[in-house]
Amino acid sequence: MAGWTRRIFTSIAAATLVTLAAGAAQAQIKIGAVLSATGPASFLGDPSKRTLEMYVERLNAAGGINGQRIQLIIYDDGGDANQARTFATRLVEDDKIVAMVGGSTTGTTMAMIPIFEEARIPFISLGGAIQIIDPVRPYVFKTPHTDKMACEKIFQDIQRRRLTTIAMISGTDGFGASMHDQCVAVAPRFGITIAHSERYGPRDSDMTPQLTNIRNRAGVQAVVNAGFGQGPAIVTRNYRQLAVPFPLYQSHGVASKQFIELAGEAANGVRLPAAALLVAAKLPDSDPQKAVVVGYSTTYEQRSGQPVSTFGGHAYDGLMLLVEAIKKANSSDPKKIRDALEQIRGFMGTAGVVNMSPTDHMGLDLTAFRMLEIRNGDWTIVPEGGS
């Protein structure tokens, strides 16, 4: 059976199981999700799928939203943008959803945006690139921090280290290309010069030539890798093998334990901006975000048997923002849900405090990011103002 056909059948079966799990009564609020639960981006999509399923089950057990049960319809695009668009069309035309949480990658998200915009159905994306919500589109929102924010947080840390000249190595995927461009755009504001750039493709298994070029470039003091998936782990291993003598930064696109496992000991010393979720238990009790991130982390790890990742957290935030909007609107009408989403203020999620507005469909600022360093195979918090 062809791979895409298998994904359709698997996705339909998954959607059916979720519907059956919701109980015998017909669900009245249909929420869709198109996720990369399998394929090269499964480290993004699988924890999102698990999260949506477990929390929809919990919500329905507690009576649903405003007394109405939720029907969650999930399709697996396998990381293929064309399949994502096909499933988005199916959710609109056949399944008649009222809102959508999903889009594991920038590429799949961008492929689906025209479908939901035309249908006027709220779409809360889990993709990372800033172009998802800039420019603002009426029906498109997102929960993860943007690639532009990642550049800014990294450059703040580089400034604190009194470094001024960097090199970049970036994936050619949608996220990697976008983050590269965002870093180039904001670097002058931080007094940082990007002296050299290299690229790698999604199928590349050795980045030694690119990193050798960077190591031999005069004046480079740090390296920033813009990318997600297995590429950054390969970059990290090759970086240590070449004994490149300056700091390596990754993006929030690797904010899961899977990156540490893939990179092994080479990951020690790597810094990256990420949500507080990865260090939930290490936050001081006075941190206003601690209760939310500890609660989600505990629930996810107990129910799934897997380490928590920020990617599941993005799905949690998307679902709970949608729940709040439906409650606020007291309606499952897509237009009213959209209007309510845009008015949400002070929502405490796993990514930070969300303050939506007509000009900001993400609602996070730079304080939502924590700078982390990997030490002895685990996440540690880099103190603000530290070096």
Image (cartoon, helix red, strand yellow):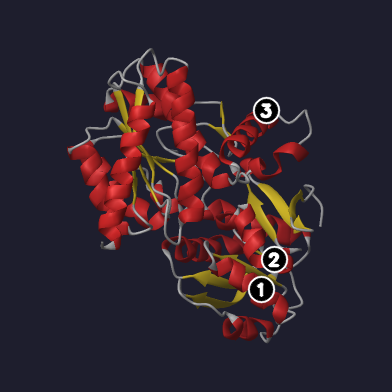
Q: Tell me the kind of residue under disc 2.
A: Gly
| Horizontal and vertical percent position of residue 137 | 33, 42
Q: Image point 70% across, 85% down: which residue?
A: 218
Q: Image point 81% across, 57% down: which residue?
A: 387
In space, the residues marked 3 and 2 are separated at their CA atoms by: 30 Å
Q: Determine which quarter of the picture holds residue 183.
A: bottom right
Answer whether labels 3 and 2 touch (C-beta < 8 Å).
no
Residue 79, above or below 75:
below
Residue 150, above or below 262:
above
Most foreground residue, 226 or 301: 301
Element under disc 1:
helix
Answer whether labels 1 and 3 touch (C-beta < 8 Å).
no
Query: For residue 237, which numbered disc appears in the image?
Result: 1
Query: For residue 291, which numbered disc appears in the image?
Result: 3
Q: Nearer the viewer, mark 3 or mark 2?
A: 2
Residue 139, above or below 86:
above
Q: Residues within 10 Å of mark 2 (few under 14, many from 20)?
A: some
Q: Nearer the viewer, mark 2 or mark 1?
A: 2
Furthest residue toward left: 93
| Circle 2 residue | 264
Q: Which of marks 1 and 2 precedes in the sequence?
A: 1
Residue 189, above or below 311:
below
| Horizontal and vertical percent position of residue 349 | 57, 33
Q: Determine which quarter of the picture holds residue 322.
A: top left
Answer whether labels 2 and 1 touch (C-beta < 8 Å).
yes
| Horizontal and vertical percent position of residue 44 | 49, 51
